[in-house]
Image (spheres, rainbow, N blue to C red):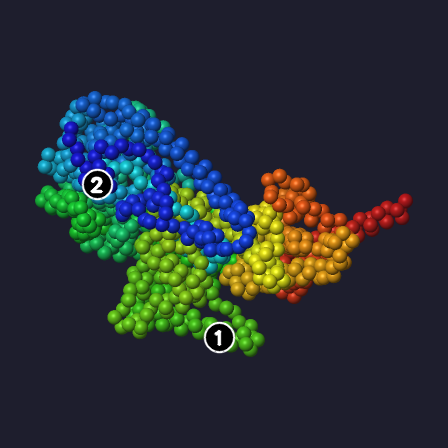
Amino acid sequence: MCMYLHLESMCAGEENWVDSRTIYIGHREPPSGTDAYIPQRYPDNRIVSSKLIIDTPTSPITSGLPLFFVITVTAVKQGYEDWLRHKADNAVNQCPVHIIQHGKVVRKQSRKLRVGDIVLVKEDETFPCDLIFLSSSREDGTCFVTTASLDGESSHKTYYAVQDTKAFRTEQEVDTINATIECEQPQSDLYKYVGRINIYQDRDEPTAREAFSHSSDLRSTETHFDLQFSMLYANTKTKKSYCIPIEYVFTDKTGTLTENNMEFIECCVDGHVYVADAICNGQILTGTVGMDMIDSSPGAGGKEREELFFRALCLCHTVQVKEEESVDGIKKGLQPCGKSSSVYISSSPDEVALVEGMKRFELMEVLSFDSVRRRMSVIVKSSTGEYYLFCKGADSSIFPRVIKGKVDQVRARVEHNAVEGLRTLCVAYKTLAQDEYESVCKQINTAKLALHDRDKKLAEAFDVIERDLILLGATAVEDRLQDKAADTIESLHKAGMKVWVLTGDKMETAAATCYACKLFHRNTQILELTTKRTEEQSLHDVLFDLSKTVLRHCGSLTRDTVSGLSHDVPDYGLIIDGATLSSVMKPTEEGSSGNYKEIFLEICRNCSAVLCCRMAPLQKAQIVKMIKTSKEHPITLAIGDGANDVSMILEAHVGIGIMGKEGRQAARNSDYAIPKFKHLKKMLLVHGHYYYIRISELVQYFFYKNVCFIFPQFLYQFFCGFSQQPLYDTAYLTLYNISFTSLPILLYSLIEQHVNMDILKRDPSLYRDIAKNSLLRWRIFIYWTLLGVFDAVVFFFGAYFLFDNTTFTSNGQLMTANTNMMFGNWTFGTLVFTVLVFTVTLKLALDTQYWTWINHFVIWGSLLFYIIFSLLWGGIIWPFLNYQRMYYVFMQMLSSGPAWLGIILLITISLIPDMLKKVICRQLWPTSAERIQRIRADKTFERVFTYSHDSLLEESQLTSEA
């Protein structure tokens, strides 16, 4: 066998060794084309380099130990994760696989696979590497694969063998293949692959349906042969998280707000409406069976159109048939005698029910669905030799291509169903002559063979083929709202967030869903910016009319507010479609006069909700980017469940994926994944609220406690002749941020709950307290900094005045007259440091609202640890120290009564400003949470007082009766 593979990053014969632990060290980038490159992280470099430019008289151990501690903790964490990856790699590398060598099946470990090996994969086995599908045990050369381990989709996907090799069934036949493959470099897109295989001067291309990805599973096919052609490359990204409160929420509709569980409601065939049950005078007649009409019976040709309509539904799909007695979890087809003969397998479970009972047609070509065309087609051949093209898709993509049929009647019914919130699908067909079919096949094959712009050429070929159709009818299905979706959106509105719905559905269907989920209310004034309106007026006039409408409201509101008059604020909602959005986003030749984007943004800012319908995936991302980069720079969140939502999820500051029925593409590319849309309420209003409060306190507190720590050393330089003499002992310098003050704030940032969780869920308006990044503004930062400076001044000069008067004892020692302690640098510094540790720890205790036994243990335990450490550090002669300047210093301080009084007095003075600020702000400018807490406390007190009063009255009555 001779097999060549043209890949720049891989040579023939390279082993399939899986190793996810490649790391490039240093600032130089690796060679181009390397995927496993971890870019430089500047914050880490800044931490290291900041230690290199400081020149102090302190010991290198004192300066290096905190850095060593941080690096060690990070290294242990990364090392453990690396060991787990190493363990998983070994399991994959030692997995047994079967390959074909010299016409025989040979078993070896997966790590010994080489490029060019032919792999034999059996049913329910996992693909050991990336493969090209050569042949199958099925006669039609197909197999069924699940990719749940890659994208979460458990549905069966159909793959087709290379046309020139699918007839090879035995090991000896497969081993005789001599071919060359031309293909693109590995890429992250699992569903797109461009390449060409040359076998004995014949060419056929391996499309995405012929290329398998590593970790996919083979289903419902006994065996098939594959050619290994490349390895898997994986990139790991650090998830991002934003503590700034969310201002804009962009959500998909289908599968996110709705269940994505379609229930058939009706169909319209040739202008006649059919429902699942008979309806009389608006009432459903129970006990009826089958499909019934709600209007007049069709004419003479109606039966033929009905047959064509349902034939199109039954043939325009990707269902495959497997001959087998039983397959777990897959629906079976039955022959008249009750014998199990076939199993229908499809990527869409809904299609299985439509194909049972259909007579045999030969499938010739499949024009797959994509989000740009919004339709799919099949070309089939009947038993009489006639060729048909059946097409189904969105009404916006079908109606422009129809030249015949009752278009007006069907269109009216489609619009009626859309207003009711139903999802519609239009069906059309056309017949193909023999020469026309051959021409179609030639166009498709030519496009498939292209190595460059293949998708574009296929789209052009499909566009030519799917023309001059005859309209058959339309279907209507209902996609119900998810549980508590309306409550979630209403809560987000009350929290001050603006919710935008971005969907590919038509305007009427999306608008009905928006009313149902309370995005729009009945009193909402809808502003339409759609193609229908821009056809009547120019886009310039429509935009300026809408702008005047919303700005007139803003102006009147300001005047009424100033005059003190009441004013009913109108609620505006905007609806825009994809075509109009393209015109708004497109730059015009008129320059600044055609700057429609800013006008559009101004309209959106004054609307409480926006619905964007008929959106392509790229347009969703453009919308998010436009809002994110506007002059306010708001924080955005995007949530979706499908692959078409990935672009906007990646574009937003925070991306959330819903693990729905469309696989896990959205979840894999998101920052967070949730099961249902309703969980977004608790995630933002509760955990998001807690997270922001904790992080803001963590950041400000770290600045505060380090200002308190460093500023006394700065003041001390004025009293030591700027000799860089440290105020604190080296052990205190080392352990201050590692042990003495780190654990309390760490625990605070993990478990603090300033407001009860139930209160946050019941009152979404509390989220407004943290809106616009209110707790991380310059005003708050300056307050914390000034508070730290004030406390540092109190520490230093309070201790300085205690050491002001000094006297000599009889033995020549210098003692302080105020505290009766031995005067010295380390005694003074220890007193300052003791006040410092107790003050910053008690400051955090005052800010803590949610007390548990863990809080008590950590806060009081940290103070106790400081005392015990100081006693041991200064009370024992340590043999490994050359000199012990702290010997007996701390114990002497504790033996002095005035020192105790001075420590307590300085701690109290330092905490008084913060306590006064809290009391005054709670009384004069309370937050919403504080007001609710006060009301709840008053009600609790009133309830307890009433209960006590009633109990006393009852007791007195019993006493009097006795």
Kindly identify the residue that appears in the image at 35 percent across and 40 percent down: 22
Q: Mark 1 = which residue? A: 556
Which residue is more in the foreground, 405 or 89? 89
Residue at x-position 59% and y-position 49%: 730
Amino acid found under the numbered disc labelled 1: Ser
Instruction: First in sequence, mark 1 or 2: give its number.
Output: 2
Instruction: Identify the residue at image location x=45%, y=62%.
Output: 608
What's the mark number on residue 244? none
Q: Amino acid at mark 2?
A: Leu
Circle 2 residue: 7
Q: Position of residue 212 (x, y in %)?
A: 27, 36
Residue nearer the viewer, 863 or 13 = 863
Relative placement, left or right, of 673 versus 954 is: left
Could you tell me which residue is drawn at 18 percent across and 52 percent down?
Answer: 460
Q: Which x, y percent locates residue 269?
A: 27, 48
> In the rendered image, is residue 440 in sight?
no
Whether pointer 1 and pointer 2 mark residues with C-beta atoms closer than 8 Å, the reply is no
Q: Position of residue 797 (x, y in %)?
A: 67, 62
